[in-house]
Image: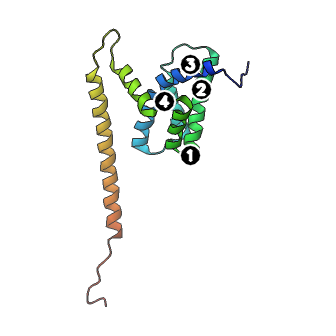
Amino acid sequence: MNRHTITEQEMMEEAALFQEIYPVFIEEVDRIEAARGKLSEFQLMRAAARGKDIMGHLSWERRQTVNAIFETYIDIYRNYGREDADEWVVLTLGSSRKAIIERGYKHNWEYPGNSEPNVGSRIEELSRLLLEKEAELLWIHRELSLLQGMITPVKKTDEDT
């Protein structure tokens, strides 16, 4: 059955599910953008797949709805950029990106049956991210130095004039 419309209740259920998936998705998008800039369609699809890995077993209709949400995000990202895609999430799903991500981090930081945060894994994650950023900044600095060296004007001596 190919449904083109869903009820408001179904959309609210899928929006809640997407808000659980979104932090994983956006974390992957952030990581790749930091290293390589704007993502290709393939990279966006991989980030969406990583997010959808936590969905568990869902009915075919629910999975199709979540896929449609990701496809729309990816289409907006490709055509208009990350900012517009993130804004679409806020407008469509009724929650800010920051709130969705904070909810996701709180969810990821807790051990099952334990309310204490998993600080160790967060430290490892942030350390890895810091190393990636440092490597990226070094690369940018090298390129900048190279380019600056290429445009340094050659000084004319009195003999050349």
Pointer 3 or 1: first along the chain:
3
- In the depicted view, which residue is nearer to us: 85 or 149? 85
Pointer 2 or 1: first along the chain:
2
Q: Between marks 3 and 2, how big is the CA–CA gap?
A: 14 Å
Q: Position of residue 8 (x, y in %)?
A: 63, 21
Pointer 3 or 4: first along the chain:
3
Q: Which residue is mark 4?
A: 95
Q: Between marks 2 and 1, how big is the CA–CA gap?
A: 20 Å
Q: Position of residue 159 (x, y in %)?
A: 27, 90
Q: Is the Cβ of the residue at disc 3 closer than 8 Å to that at disc 1? A: no
Q: Quadrant of the N terminus?
A: top right
Amino acid type indicated by mark 2:
Asn
Pointer 3 or 2: first along the chain:
3
Dot 1: element: helix
Q: Position of residue 158 (x, y in %)?
A: 26, 89
Amino acid type indicated by mark 1:
Tyr
Pointer 1 or 4: first along the chain:
1
Dot 2: element: helix
Q: Which residue is mark 1?
A: 80
Q: Residue at x 48, y 28 (%)?
A: 22
Q: Which residue is mark 2?
A: 67
Q: Which residue is mark 3?
A: 13
